[in-house]
Amino acid sequence: MESVIYSTLPPQAAKLLDIQPQGSKEAEAFVNAFLKRSMPRLKDEAIQDKLTRKAVVLEHCPKRRKKDKRKKTKGFSAKQRREMRLFEIKPEQQKQPQMIQAKLLKADLHGAIVTVTKSKCPSYVGITGIILQEMKHIFKIITKEDKLKVIPKLNNVFSLEVDGFISHIYGSKFQLRASERSAKKFKAKGTIDL
């Protein structure tokens, strides 16, 4: 078996492959070095044992790469945020929606364009029109199709655009006549969604 493993290439094959011919000792040294690189876990005795007794199956042992720790993307530091002025609001953008909503609570909504955005009755959602008449419990709205719709305030949320701000009116909190609403003082309260 050793003579087969360490035998030199015939001169014609060496010329064809452009390889310098080697002696049996050089071939033996090359094979041993190659096997040590191919099977780094095995000791010399184990490699020799495999050569004499069994067919050699070369395994590919890639070098273990160090796992790169994933870098967490960090946000800006407080200093960077201050330098970039991320949270500074320009004076023209400092309009307070609360002021608009306070005025809207006391406003007469006749002629305003409103849209039903949320409702417990799905058939009301999406209705848009002009308020023709406001009563204590209902809005009478005329739509684009010139149809008069009577929509209850209870369990409905209406949206209304004023000065570029879209305000939401919770109908259940809005159950007053327009004349009564203008004289009433409202307290700021959180609203519970439908």
Image (cartoon, helix red, strand yellow):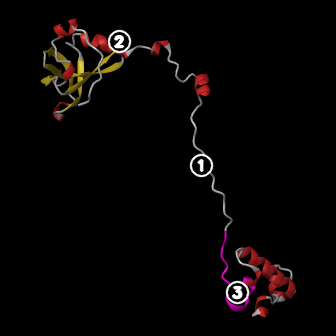
Type of amino acid under label 3: Lys
The three-letter code of the residue at mark 2 reads: Met
Q: Are marks 1 and 3 in contact (CB under 8 Å)?
A: no
Which is closer to the viewer, label 2 or label 3? 3
Callout 2 environment at 10 Å: few (<14), some (14 to 19), or many (20+)? few
Which residue is denoted by mark 2 in the rendering? 99
Rendered residue at 75%/76% (across/down): 36
Q: Where does residue 15 sit, x and y in percent of width and height? A: 83, 83
State the residue in front, 167 or 144: 167
Q: Earlier in the sequence, mark 1 or mark 3?
A: 3
Q: Which residue is situated farthest in the top direction here?
A: 183
> Label 1, label 3: how many angstroms apart (C-alpha)?
42 Å
For mark 3, what is the residue? 50
Distance from disc 2 to disc 3, alpha carbons, whole Å, reads 89 Å
Q: Is residue 47 magenta?
A: yes
Q: Which amino acid lies under the numbered mark 1 shown in the image of this protein?
A: Arg
